[in-house]
Amino acid sequence: MLSLRPHRTTFSRPLSWPRRGRLGGAAAPHYVSAAAPAAALESAAPPESVSFPILVNGCTGKMGLSVAEAAALRGLHLVPVSFSSREKVEKAIQVGQTDIRIYGPSTREDVLSSIADEFPDVIVVDYTAPDSVNSNAELYCKLGLPFVMGTTGGNKHLLYKSVQDSKSYALISPQMGKQVVAFVAAMKIMAEQFPGAFSGYHLEVLESHQAGKLDTSGTAKDVIACFEKLGVSYDMNRMVKIRDPEQQLEMVGVPEEHIQGHAFHLYHLTSPDDSVSFEFQHNVCGRSIYAEGTIDAAIFLHRKVQSKDSKRIYNMDDVLREGFMR
Protein backbone atom coordinates (compact mmCIF):
# COMPACT_ATOMS: atom_id res chain seq x y z
CA MET A 1 0.00 0.00 0.00
CA LEU A 2 1.41 3.35 -1.03
CA SER A 3 1.91 5.69 1.90
CA LEU A 4 1.87 9.42 1.32
CA ARG A 5 3.00 10.43 4.80
CA PRO A 6 6.40 12.14 4.79
CA HIS A 7 8.77 9.75 6.47
CA ARG A 8 10.43 12.32 8.75
CA THR A 9 7.68 14.80 9.60
CA THR A 10 5.06 14.71 12.32
CA PHE A 11 2.81 17.20 10.54
CA SER A 12 -0.74 16.47 11.56
CA ARG A 13 -2.08 15.82 8.05
CA PRO A 14 -0.68 13.15 5.72
CA LEU A 15 0.67 14.50 2.46
CA SER A 16 -2.09 13.99 -0.06
CA TRP A 17 -4.18 15.92 -2.52
CA PRO A 18 -7.04 17.91 -1.01
CA ARG A 19 -10.23 16.12 -1.88
CA ARG A 20 -12.63 17.80 -4.22
CA GLY A 21 -14.96 19.72 -1.97
CA ARG A 22 -13.70 21.63 1.06
CA LEU A 23 -10.62 21.21 3.18
CA GLY A 24 -10.38 23.21 6.39
CA GLY A 25 -12.85 25.76 5.07
CA ALA A 26 -10.86 26.41 1.89
CA ALA A 27 -12.62 26.44 -1.44
CA ALA A 28 -12.19 23.43 -3.69
CA PRO A 29 -9.21 23.69 -6.07
CA HIS A 30 -9.95 24.89 -9.59
CA TYR A 31 -9.36 22.30 -12.27
CA VAL A 32 -8.36 23.54 -15.72
CA SER A 33 -10.50 21.49 -18.08
CA ALA A 34 -10.28 20.64 -21.76
CA ALA A 35 -14.06 20.77 -21.99
CA ALA A 36 -14.28 24.56 -22.46
CA PRO A 37 -17.02 25.32 -25.02
CA ALA A 38 -16.07 26.75 -28.39
CA ALA A 39 -17.90 30.00 -27.67
CA ALA A 40 -15.83 30.54 -24.53
CA LEU A 41 -12.60 29.95 -26.43
CA GLU A 42 -13.59 32.36 -29.18
CA SER A 43 -14.61 35.09 -26.75
CA ALA A 44 -11.29 34.72 -24.94
CA ALA A 45 -9.21 35.13 -28.11
CA PRO A 46 -6.92 38.15 -28.42
CA PRO A 47 -8.77 41.15 -29.86
CA GLU A 48 -6.44 41.46 -32.83
CA SER A 49 -7.57 39.08 -35.60
CA VAL A 50 -4.86 37.02 -37.25
CA SER A 51 -4.86 34.22 -39.78
CA PHE A 52 -2.07 32.28 -41.45
CA PRO A 53 -1.43 28.70 -42.59
CA ILE A 54 -0.55 26.23 -39.82
CA LEU A 55 0.52 22.63 -40.30
CA VAL A 56 0.13 20.37 -37.27
CA ASN A 57 2.47 17.39 -37.52
CA GLY A 58 1.10 14.63 -35.30
CA CYS A 59 -2.67 14.89 -35.80
CA THR A 60 -2.97 11.13 -35.27
CA GLY A 61 -2.11 11.71 -31.59
CA LYS A 62 -4.37 13.22 -28.94
CA MET A 63 -2.22 16.30 -28.36
CA GLY A 64 -1.74 17.04 -32.05
CA LEU A 65 -5.44 16.67 -32.70
CA SER A 66 -6.25 19.02 -29.80
CA VAL A 67 -3.91 21.64 -31.28
CA ALA A 68 -5.48 21.30 -34.73
CA GLU A 69 -8.94 21.77 -33.20
CA ALA A 70 -7.75 24.84 -31.28
CA ALA A 71 -6.26 26.27 -34.49
CA ALA A 72 -9.58 25.87 -36.28
CA LEU A 73 -11.42 27.60 -33.39
CA ARG A 74 -8.99 30.52 -33.58
CA GLY A 75 -9.61 30.98 -37.30
CA LEU A 76 -6.20 29.84 -38.52
CA HIS A 77 -5.87 28.15 -41.92
CA LEU A 78 -5.24 24.46 -41.27
CA VAL A 79 -2.98 23.00 -43.96
CA PRO A 80 -4.68 19.69 -44.87
CA VAL A 81 -1.54 17.62 -44.28
CA SER A 82 0.00 15.71 -41.38
CA PHE A 83 2.34 12.77 -40.95
CA SER A 84 2.47 9.39 -39.28
CA SER A 85 5.42 7.25 -38.21
CA ARG A 86 3.82 4.32 -40.01
CA GLU A 87 4.46 3.91 -43.73
CA LYS A 88 1.12 2.48 -44.79
CA VAL A 89 -1.46 5.02 -43.80
CA GLU A 90 -4.75 5.31 -45.64
CA LYS A 91 -6.79 7.72 -43.62
CA ALA A 92 -7.81 11.31 -43.25
CA ILE A 93 -8.83 13.21 -40.13
CA GLN A 94 -11.56 15.82 -40.22
CA VAL A 95 -10.97 18.90 -38.08
CA GLY A 96 -13.70 21.50 -38.42
CA GLN A 97 -14.24 21.92 -42.14
CA THR A 98 -10.80 20.57 -43.08
CA ASP A 99 -9.96 17.02 -44.10
CA ILE A 100 -6.35 16.42 -43.11
CA ARG A 101 -4.59 13.75 -45.13
CA ILE A 102 -2.04 11.63 -43.26
CA TYR A 103 1.21 10.72 -45.04
CA GLY A 104 3.86 8.15 -44.16
CA PRO A 105 7.47 9.05 -43.34
CA SER A 106 8.93 8.22 -46.78
CA THR A 107 7.00 11.08 -48.44
CA ARG A 108 7.64 13.56 -45.67
CA GLU A 109 10.34 15.67 -47.32
CA ASP A 110 8.60 15.88 -50.72
CA VAL A 111 5.26 16.82 -49.18
CA LEU A 112 6.78 19.41 -46.84
CA SER A 113 8.77 20.90 -49.73
CA SER A 114 5.53 21.35 -51.67
CA ILE A 115 3.88 22.89 -48.61
CA ALA A 116 6.76 25.38 -48.26
CA ASP A 117 6.24 26.47 -51.89
CA GLU A 118 2.44 26.68 -51.67
CA PHE A 119 2.28 28.30 -48.23
CA PRO A 120 5.39 30.49 -47.82
CA ASP A 121 4.19 31.92 -44.50
CA VAL A 122 3.25 28.56 -42.93
CA ILE A 123 4.09 27.73 -39.31
CA VAL A 124 4.66 24.05 -38.46
CA VAL A 125 3.66 22.68 -35.06
CA ASP A 126 5.26 19.40 -33.99
CA TYR A 127 3.58 16.96 -31.59
CA THR A 128 5.04 13.68 -32.79
CA ALA A 129 7.30 11.32 -30.83
CA PRO A 130 10.50 11.78 -28.79
CA ASP A 131 12.60 9.77 -31.25
CA SER A 132 11.44 12.01 -34.13
CA VAL A 133 12.30 15.37 -32.57
CA ASN A 134 15.77 15.82 -34.05
CA SER A 135 15.11 14.39 -37.51
CA ASN A 136 11.93 16.46 -37.85
CA ALA A 137 13.68 19.63 -36.71
CA GLU A 138 16.54 19.06 -39.16
CA LEU A 139 14.05 18.72 -42.01
CA TYR A 140 12.10 21.84 -41.03
CA CYS A 141 15.37 23.77 -40.91
CA LYS A 142 16.53 22.36 -44.24
CA LEU A 143 13.32 23.53 -45.91
CA GLY A 144 13.26 26.89 -44.09
CA LEU A 145 10.03 26.10 -42.25
CA PRO A 146 9.59 27.97 -38.94
CA PHE A 147 8.28 25.59 -36.29
CA VAL A 148 6.91 25.25 -32.79
CA MET A 149 8.36 22.16 -31.09
CA GLY A 150 5.99 20.89 -28.45
CA THR A 151 7.29 17.32 -28.54
CA THR A 152 9.52 16.44 -25.60
CA GLY A 153 12.60 14.26 -25.82
CA GLY A 154 15.39 13.99 -28.34
CA ASN A 155 18.81 15.60 -28.06
CA LYS A 156 18.23 19.15 -26.87
CA HIS A 157 21.73 20.33 -27.79
CA LEU A 158 21.40 19.05 -31.37
CA LEU A 159 17.92 20.53 -31.63
CA TYR A 160 19.16 24.02 -30.80
CA LYS A 161 22.25 23.56 -33.00
CA SER A 162 20.08 22.65 -36.01
CA VAL A 163 18.13 25.88 -35.65
CA GLN A 164 21.20 28.02 -35.02
CA ASP A 165 23.15 26.61 -37.97
CA SER A 166 20.25 27.05 -40.37
CA LYS A 167 19.26 30.47 -39.02
CA SER A 168 15.66 29.29 -39.02
CA TYR A 169 12.93 30.47 -36.66
CA ALA A 170 11.74 28.14 -33.90
CA LEU A 171 9.91 28.19 -30.61
CA ILE A 172 10.94 25.29 -28.40
CA SER A 173 9.19 24.46 -25.15
CA PRO A 174 8.42 21.18 -23.37
CA GLN A 175 5.64 22.99 -21.47
CA MET A 176 3.02 24.92 -23.45
CA GLY A 177 0.57 25.65 -20.64
CA LYS A 178 1.05 29.40 -20.24
CA GLN A 179 -0.10 29.61 -16.64
CA VAL A 180 2.13 26.69 -15.66
CA VAL A 181 5.04 28.36 -17.47
CA ALA A 182 4.33 31.56 -15.52
CA PHE A 183 4.32 29.63 -12.23
CA VAL A 184 7.68 27.98 -12.98
CA ALA A 185 9.10 31.36 -14.07
CA ALA A 186 7.99 32.86 -10.75
CA MET A 187 9.67 30.01 -8.89
CA LYS A 188 12.90 30.67 -10.80
CA ILE A 189 12.78 34.36 -9.89
CA MET A 190 12.26 33.49 -6.22
CA ALA A 191 15.16 31.03 -6.34
CA GLU A 192 17.46 33.58 -7.96
CA GLN A 193 16.58 36.42 -5.61
CA PHE A 194 16.30 34.48 -2.35
CA PRO A 195 18.78 31.58 -2.48
CA GLY A 196 18.75 29.49 0.65
CA ALA A 197 15.40 30.86 1.87
CA PHE A 198 14.15 27.32 2.60
CA SER A 199 17.40 25.87 3.93
CA GLY A 200 16.73 22.89 6.16
CA TYR A 201 13.16 22.43 4.96
CA HIS A 202 11.97 18.95 4.00
CA LEU A 203 10.35 18.53 0.57
CA GLU A 204 7.85 15.92 -0.56
CA VAL A 205 6.67 15.80 -4.18
CA LEU A 206 3.78 13.92 -5.73
CA GLU A 207 2.80 13.95 -9.38
CA SER A 208 0.01 12.14 -11.20
CA HIS A 209 -0.33 11.71 -14.95
CA GLN A 210 -2.17 9.36 -17.29
CA ALA A 211 -0.84 5.81 -17.33
CA GLY A 212 0.76 6.29 -20.75
CA LYS A 213 3.29 8.79 -19.37
CA LEU A 214 6.19 6.65 -18.27
CA ASP A 215 8.77 9.35 -17.59
CA THR A 216 8.98 11.81 -14.72
CA SER A 217 7.25 15.15 -15.12
CA GLY A 218 9.61 17.73 -16.61
CA THR A 219 7.69 20.49 -14.85
CA ALA A 220 8.24 18.77 -11.50
CA LYS A 221 11.96 18.57 -12.25
CA ASP A 222 12.08 22.30 -13.01
CA VAL A 223 10.24 23.21 -9.80
CA ILE A 224 12.43 20.88 -7.71
CA ALA A 225 15.53 22.54 -9.20
CA CYS A 226 14.17 25.87 -7.93
CA PHE A 227 13.62 24.45 -4.45
CA GLU A 228 17.19 23.13 -4.45
CA LYS A 229 18.47 26.65 -5.17
CA LEU A 230 16.29 27.79 -2.28
CA GLY A 231 18.29 25.51 0.00
CA VAL A 232 16.24 22.29 -0.04
CA SER A 233 18.00 18.96 -0.48
CA TYR A 234 15.96 16.47 -2.50
CA ASP A 235 16.50 12.96 -3.87
CA MET A 236 14.56 12.53 -7.12
CA ASN A 237 14.08 8.85 -6.33
CA ARG A 238 11.77 9.85 -3.48
CA MET A 239 9.22 11.47 -5.78
CA VAL A 240 5.84 9.75 -5.69
CA LYS A 241 4.68 9.14 -9.27
CA ILE A 242 1.09 7.97 -9.52
CA ARG A 243 0.00 6.21 -12.71
CA ASP A 244 -2.61 3.77 -11.41
CA PRO A 245 -6.13 4.92 -12.42
CA GLU A 246 -7.73 3.58 -9.23
CA GLN A 247 -5.33 5.55 -7.03
CA GLN A 248 -5.83 8.62 -9.20
CA LEU A 249 -9.59 8.42 -8.69
CA GLU A 250 -9.67 7.56 -5.01
CA MET A 251 -6.53 9.15 -3.59
CA VAL A 252 -5.69 12.04 -5.91
CA GLY A 253 -9.23 13.04 -6.84
CA VAL A 254 -8.76 13.18 -10.61
CA PRO A 255 -12.17 13.49 -12.29
CA GLU A 256 -12.97 10.18 -13.98
CA GLU A 257 -13.38 11.78 -17.41
CA HIS A 258 -9.79 13.04 -17.23
CA ILE A 259 -8.00 9.88 -16.10
CA GLN A 260 -6.60 9.53 -19.63
CA GLY A 261 -5.35 13.10 -19.77
CA HIS A 262 -4.27 15.06 -16.69
CA ALA A 263 -1.23 16.52 -14.92
CA PHE A 264 -1.45 16.96 -11.15
CA HIS A 265 1.49 18.21 -9.08
CA LEU A 266 1.88 18.74 -5.33
CA TYR A 267 4.96 20.11 -3.52
CA HIS A 268 4.91 20.08 0.29
CA LEU A 269 7.59 21.79 2.40
CA THR A 270 8.01 21.33 6.16
CA SER A 271 10.33 23.28 8.46
CA PRO A 272 13.04 21.40 10.44
CA ASP A 273 10.95 21.49 13.64
CA ASP A 274 7.68 20.66 11.81
CA SER A 275 6.09 23.91 13.01
CA VAL A 276 5.76 25.51 9.54
CA SER A 277 4.57 24.08 6.24
CA PHE A 278 4.13 25.38 2.71
CA GLU A 279 2.22 23.72 -0.10
CA PHE A 280 2.29 24.44 -3.85
CA GLN A 281 -0.18 22.74 -6.15
CA HIS A 282 -1.09 22.92 -9.83
CA ASN A 283 -3.62 20.56 -11.41
CA VAL A 284 -4.52 20.32 -15.08
CA CYS A 285 -7.38 18.26 -16.50
CA GLY A 286 -7.41 17.62 -20.23
CA ARG A 287 -5.24 19.19 -22.91
CA SER A 288 -6.87 22.55 -23.68
CA ILE A 289 -4.35 24.59 -21.68
CA TYR A 290 -1.52 23.13 -23.80
CA ALA A 291 -3.40 23.39 -27.10
CA GLU A 292 -4.36 27.02 -26.55
CA GLY A 293 -0.83 27.88 -25.43
CA THR A 294 0.58 26.21 -28.53
CA ILE A 295 -1.64 28.31 -30.80
CA ASP A 296 -0.53 31.48 -29.02
CA ALA A 297 3.06 30.32 -29.50
CA ALA A 298 2.43 29.82 -33.22
CA ILE A 299 0.87 33.30 -33.53
CA PHE A 300 3.82 34.79 -31.65
CA LEU A 301 6.34 33.00 -33.91
CA HIS A 302 4.48 34.02 -37.07
CA ARG A 303 4.73 37.67 -36.02
CA LYS A 304 8.46 37.31 -35.36
CA VAL A 305 9.01 35.76 -38.79
CA GLN A 306 6.97 38.44 -40.55
CA SER A 307 8.86 41.21 -38.76
CA LYS A 308 12.19 39.52 -39.59
CA ASP A 309 13.21 39.68 -35.94
CA SER A 310 16.95 39.21 -35.38
CA LYS A 311 16.33 36.66 -32.65
CA ARG A 312 15.58 33.20 -34.05
CA ILE A 313 15.00 30.82 -31.11
CA TYR A 314 12.25 31.47 -28.56
CA ASN A 315 10.48 29.75 -25.68
CA MET A 316 7.18 30.21 -23.86
CA ASP A 317 8.69 32.77 -21.50
CA ASP A 318 9.12 35.03 -24.53
CA VAL A 319 5.46 34.55 -25.44
CA LEU A 320 4.34 35.54 -21.95
CA ARG A 321 6.60 38.60 -21.85
CA GLU A 322 4.79 40.00 -24.87
CA GLY A 323 1.45 39.75 -23.12
CA PHE A 324 0.01 36.58 -24.62
CA MET A 325 -2.00 35.75 -21.49
CA ARG A 326 -5.75 35.30 -21.66
Image (cartoon, rainbow, N blue to C red):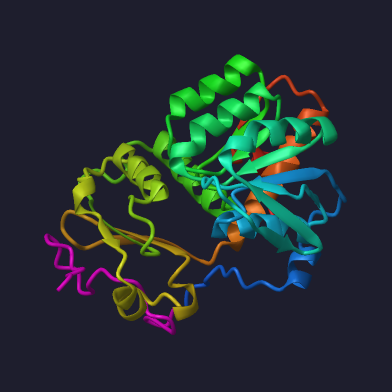
Whole-percent x and y of residue 313? 62, 27
Whole-percent x and y of residue 153? 43, 39
Q: Vertical placement of 268 versus 5: above or below? A: above
The answer to which image quadrant residue 24 occupies is: bottom left
Q: Is 17 covered by the magenta stretch?
A: yes
Q: Which residues are magenta?
A: 1-27
In the picture, which quadrant includes the C terminus?
bottom right
Whole-percent x and y of residue 210? 40, 64
In the picture, which quadrant includes the N terminus?
bottom left
Q: Vertical placement of 159 versus 270: above or below? A: above
Q: Is 25 covered by the magenta stretch?
A: yes
Judged from this view, the residue extending furthest toward the right is 49
Of residues 7 and 93, the one nearer the viewer is 93
Q: Main secondary structure of the magenta part?
A: loop
Of residues 171 and 62, the one nearer the viewer is 62
Q: At 77% from the left edge and 37% from the top edge, which residue is drawn?
A: 122
> On the rendered structure, is 198 left or right of 119?
left
> On the rendered structure, is 74 left or right of 162?
right
> On the rendered structure, is 186 left or right of 239?
right
Judged from this view, the residue extending furthest toward the top is 165
The answer to which image quadrant residue 126 occupies is: top right
Whole-percent x and y of residue 38? 75, 70
> On the rendered structure, is 104 left or right of 270?
right
Q: At 42% from the left edge and 29% from the top edge, which residue is drawn?
A: 155
Q: Vertical placement of 280 versus 83: above or below? A: below
The answer to which image quadrant residue 302 occupies is: top right
Q: At 42% from the left edge and 48% from the top edge, which residue is drawn?
A: 219
Viewer can see residue 59: yes
